[in-house]
Amino acid sequence: MESDTIIRQLVAEELDHDPSVTADGIGVAVADGVVTLSGHVASYPERFAAVRAAQRVRGVKAVAQDLLVRLPNLKKRADDEIAGRAISILNWTLHGIGNIKVTVDGGWVTLAGRVDSSHQKKDAERAIRLLGGVTGVSNEITVKTSADPVQIGSEIRKAFRRAAHLDGAGISVTVDGSTVTLIGRVKDWHERRAAEDAAWTAPGVNEVIDRLTVDYLDVGRHG
């Protein structure tokens, strides 16, 4: 297992080599395999890309980010313009915005309302993240559900078994209402994301809390 010093160096190199990230404004700290990114980036997608870059490094157990989005003046947009573009993209993504409400404050978009599925909730946030001028997204959308928590848990475990790149044997699934919590160990970040994605596929899921730990069993190259 790499030391924190080595992990910090590898994360810094990964950020430098990622074409979607400008690493000059990003600081990297590591403690017990947990990486903290601080500083500033030029867009919300860049902040997301920086976190993904850190997750790609072998030995990283978790990533915390305290990155501020500082939009260049040429990329700043008025809140009403962002809101209008958000409504347009949601209409296209969800085939009708329905009762979703969009508010924008200083480039930070808040989504509220109800949708029919967890996929719609995730798709809405994903679409907004890519809009120019957006500095952050709060997804307060709820999912309409009448599903039984026992049934939700059963559907998630079935999804685990179907997933090609996921061994769900070490993952505990608990369901409280429509909120799912995943606890356990996975071998890498790809498996962690696969577990979370599988949990979201169950009908009636409104929130997934990921408490999975990445447990590297051997020393290898990052990537």
Image (cartoon, grey):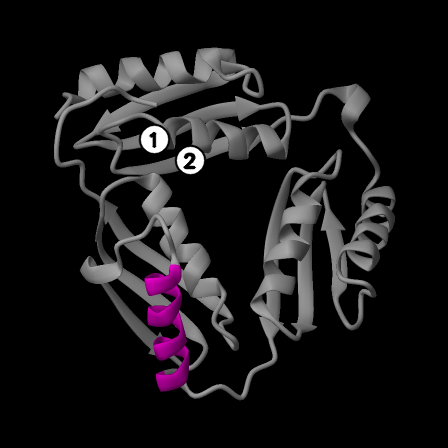
The numbered dot on residue 36 is 1
Disc 2 secondary structure class: strand
Residue 153 highlighted magenta (yes or no): yes
User: Which of the 4 image quarters holds residue 56?
Assistant: top left
Residue toward you, 46 or 164:
164
Kindly identify the residue that appears in the image at 78 percent across and 29 percent down: 76
Is 107 displayed left or right of 181 in the figure? right
Instruction: Name the quadrant containing residue 183.
Output: bottom left
From this view, report whether residue 45 is shown above or below residue 190: above
Quadrant housing residue 37: top left
Q: Amino acid at mark 1?
A: Thr
In the rendered image, residue 150, in percent from the top left (x then y), is placed at: 35, 85
- The reply to whether the C-beta atoms of the residues labelled 1 and 2 are less than 8 Å apart is yes
Q: Earlier in the sequence, mark 1 or mark 2?
A: 1
Which amino acid, by three-letter code, is at mark 2? Gln
In the rendering, which numbered label is found on residue 65? Answer: 2
Residue under the point 83% across and 59% down: 91
